[in-house]
Image: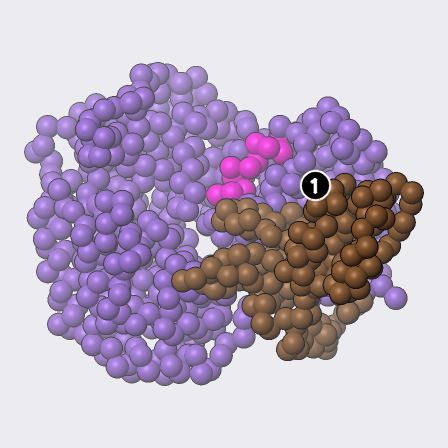
Chain colours: A brown, B purple
Amino acid sequence: MEKKNFTVSIYTENNLGLLSRIAAIFLKRHINIESITASPSEVPEVMRFIIVVEVTEEQIKKIVGQIEKQIEVIKAFYHTAEEMIYQETALYKIKSSEFLDDLNVQAFIKATNARIVTVTPKFFVIEKTGKRSEVDELYETLKPYGLMQFVRSGTIAVTKNEMPITGILEKFNTTNSIS
Amino acid sequence: MEVKTASFEKTSADTSMTVSGAEAVIKCLLEEGVETIYGYPGGAIMPVYDELYKYQDKIHHVLTRHEQGATHAAQGYARVSGKVGVAIATSGPGATNLVTGIADAQIDSTPLVCITGQVGSHLLGSDAFQETDIVGISTPITKWNYQVTKAEEIPEVIAKAFYIAKSGRPGPVLVDITKDAQFASLEFNYKKCSGIRSYKPNPEVNLVEVEQAAEAINSAKKPMIVFGQGVILGGAEELFKEFVEKTGIPAAWTILGLSALPTKHPLNVGMVGMHGNYGPNVLTNECDVLIAIGMRFDDRVTGNLDHYAKQAKVVHLEIDPAEINKNVYADFPVLGNVKETLKVLMELVQPNSHKEWHNRFKELYKTEYEKVISGNLDVNKPDLGMAEVIQQININTKGNAVIVSDVGQHQMAACRYSDFTQTRSNVTSGGLGTMGFALPAAIGAKMGSPNREVVAIIGDGGYQMTIQELGTIFQTKVPVKIVVLNNGFLGMVRQWQQLFFDRRYASTEMTNPDFVTIAKGYHIEANRVTDRSQLKDAVKTMIDHNGPYFLEVKVEQEENVFPMVPTGASVSDIILE
């Protein structure tokens, strides 16, 4: 089976230690995590992890099964790139001296929908949000100017289809007498 | 408003009182009905031990001689009684010594609650004396773990720990409690945990799934059952027996499924897997419907997956969704506790006898008997064989004993030849293969089933890994019977060296001490059998003895365990010699 990028969305309780519990599931199977983010989700007190890995669909099914098995995981989903709307953000720090002289700069910043975040006499910081390929493209464009620093965020993504977390939690509340 | 992530039972009256965190720990254990715990004291857990001193009339603490022994004893206790086993240790080395037992309990789905002391919360992360990140260390080998740093968390966390350990597919849980949390006070008011919103221990039975499975079973011409520990953990033994009898389907067991169905039941066709019986292994690749019940298709069961039951439709009754399609694709998955799913399935399956098909198992058993079993039991061969010893134990215990085995050749002999009439009678380290498991596990097994005979069968290698637990037996006078089958080798490894490494016996020969003298040093009655003529009486004397007893039996040095599915081979390519 062919390997491809899968985005795993994991809704969890907000609990110390869950990150390493989830990471250990990938580690145990010798799978490299391409990117990982953790943030609050749309449900109060519920966290959402987004993990991108390159594996086969057979592998990702089993991994999601193991993730869901963890006590404090409410639900996990996996999606292909086509099923998601996703973005990454990158920051590029460039020497002002190299940059100011070039007249093309304005043009390609505009063209790539990038944004200048900070300007100092010594450096510029440019921010770009978009698909991985767009972020990479800007990286290549800026490389000749001497990148002082480059950093890219993990993928954040929302699915095209619904992920019914609130329903799962409500069901628990109605079937259990919460004291 | 605080979000409630778990539900707790309501207590009828407000019985709240101010206690220390350490006392709360003991009170939680009492609320959960715990009577016996295993452990070892040390700096960071001393406040809890101080409370144990006060509560010693209510809770029996067994001082093992090593923390690993505490976990295995707790496992043995849990496996025979169905209750949660409890082990306690201090921080640092005390906690890390629990690791092997926790990993064993995780892979064999044994309910354990391990409580460890931790350095004071102000010292966390400072590399303090006896500080270790046991929550980090135990994360991949626990069903759940948690570090308590505030006394008021203790009741809720321990309530959750017990609920998680025993519900659904059971497993080990670790609760790490900082020393300051043990000293601080709290308002104690215990409520048992009844649910956790992110955790679904018992998947709802899906009728469509069961109907489809029933249809597959009813239309099968050559069906075969493979059952595992799920039958025992689900408390479904009686129902399972009825199911087997109604459908007339030959039933084979995994090593942990052993004793869920009496050994001599006419439809019990023996063990599957690497050293399993000939018939069920060969016929796995002939059956048309394979009905897996509460088992997880371990590689020791399946051999080469590319050649495992490819011709069969697979029905898989299983409580853990992550096990479905993990190793073997299930054409008809049936999620749920087997006690619930079997109940529904029972109504939908038609009575049958599968006589001709069953005869195939009988024929292959005959082959195995001629080529393997008769030789194993032959009393005219020069040296004593392991199976002969097991047979004598069967005769003297009438199949009513709990047999606790360690890991290796003797384990295979014990599982293949022991006679079981009751469930929860086979205690062995199946998934992890932990040498040193049996001696401490036997202590726990005897305490968990005091009215039953408990016989530990151990090799000379594994015995020496936890031999210090003889001290625990001496101190508690727990009347376990210990049989060491001494072949002077790490026998299973030696067998592999013989078969696959050209007889290069690298580091497998053991120069052993005088085991009888060691046992006597602990004031345990002891005897040695060096000749077949002594065996019968020696086993009888051991079983009749009122108290702990040690018996060393010198067995053939280079006996091999057959049948055998060589690594990488298909189960139907099982070899007999």
Q: Is residue B354 left or right of residue A118?
A: left
- Which residue in the protein does label 1 denote? B176
Looking at the image, residue B273 lies above or below residue B392 = below
Q: Position of residue B147 (x, y in %)?
A: 72, 44
* Place of residue B399 in the rendered image (x, y in percent of width and height, measured from the top left): 30, 50
Dot 1 crowding, Cα within 10 Å, few <14, some 14–19, many 20+: many
Which residue is nearer to you in this view: B48 or A133?
A133
Q: Chain of mark 1?
A: B
Is residue B100 located in the magenta-colored stretch of the structure? yes
Q: Residue furthest right?
A: A121
Image-quadrant location for residue B428: top left
Q: Secondary structure at mark 1?
A: strand
Image quarter (top left, top right, bottom left or bottom right) of the N terminus of chain B = bottom right
Span highlighted in magenta in the image: B94-105
Instruction: Count how many numbered circles sit on residues in the image.
Output: 1
Magenta stretch: dominant secondary structure: helix
The answer to whether any part of residue B418 appears in the image is: no
Residue B423, compared with residue B371, is above or below; it is below
Q: Residue at x 7, y 33 (%)?
A: B380
Residue drawn at (15%, 40%) of the image: B376
Q: Is residue B341 magenta?
A: no
Q: Nearer the viewer, residue B52 or B557?
A: B557
